[in-house]
Image (spheres, rainbow, N blue to C red):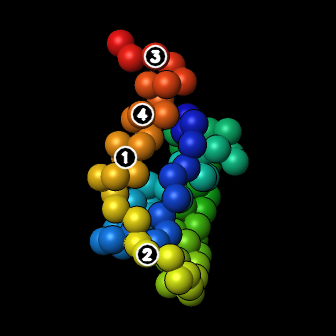
């Protein structure tokens, strides 16, 4: 089950279809409580992921900012540093 959903807005390069679908899948898993749906719920689950993906794409296209785009590698390094500080390095 997902623990967090990462921000997708204002990155260079922009979020990919795969990243948007992954975040949508995490969101639907989280709100449904199912890491994987049963056969009975599979169609509804898949439809929800597709609808959330479409809405997410629309949202990302419509948002505006004056801030410089964030760099994925820099943000990933910051996240690793926060995790190391929080949980200690192994």
Q: Secondary structure at mark 1?
A: helix
| C-alpha gap between disc 3 and disc 4 | 10 Å
Between 57 and 84, the one lying in front of the other is 84
Q: Quadrant of residue 47?
A: bottom right
Q: Are marks 2 and 3 in contact (CB under 8 Å)?
A: no
Q: Secondary structure at mark 2?
A: loop
The residue drawn where x is 49% and y is 34% is 82
The residue drawn where x is 55% and y is 81% is 65
- Work out which quarter of the rendered image holds the C terminus and state it: top left
Left or right of residue 72, residue 81 in this image: right
Q: Are marks 1 and 2 in contact (CB under 8 Å)?
A: no
Mark 2 lies on residue: 68
- Mark closer to the chain start, 1 or 2: 2
Q: How many marks?
A: 4
Residue 11 versus residue 65 in the image, above or below:
above
Between 42 and 57, the one lying in front of the other is 57
Mark 3 lies on residue: 88
Mark 1 lies on residue: 76
Left or right of residue 55, residue 81 in this image: left
The residue drawn where x is 48% and y is 64% is 8
Q: Secondary structure at mark 4?
A: helix
- Label 1 or label 4, whichever lies nearer to me, is 4
Q: Quadrant of residue 44?
A: bottom right
- Mark closer to the chain start, 1 or 3: 1
| C-alpha gap between disc 1 and disc 4 | 9 Å
Between 83 and 5, the one lying in front of the other is 83
Q: Are marks 2 and 4 in contact (CB under 8 Å)?
A: no
Give the percent coordinates (x, y) of residue 15.
38, 68
Label 2 packing within 10 angstroms: few (<14), some (14-19), many (20+): few
| C-alpha gap between disc 1 and disc 2 | 17 Å
Mark 4 lies on residue: 81
- Mark closer to the chain start, 2 or 4: 2
């Amino acid at each position: 089950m997902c623990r967090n959903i990462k921000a997708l807005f204002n990155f260079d390069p922009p979020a990919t279809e795969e990243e948007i679908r992954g975040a949508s899948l995490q969101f639907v898993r989280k709100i449904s409580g199912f890491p994987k749906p049963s056969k009975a719920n599979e169609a509804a689950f898949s439809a929800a992921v597709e609808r959330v993906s479409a809405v997410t794409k629309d949202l990302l296209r419509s948002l505006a900012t004056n801030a410089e785009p964030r760099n994925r590698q820099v943000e990933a390094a910051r996240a690793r540093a926060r995790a190391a500080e929080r949980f200690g390095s192994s």
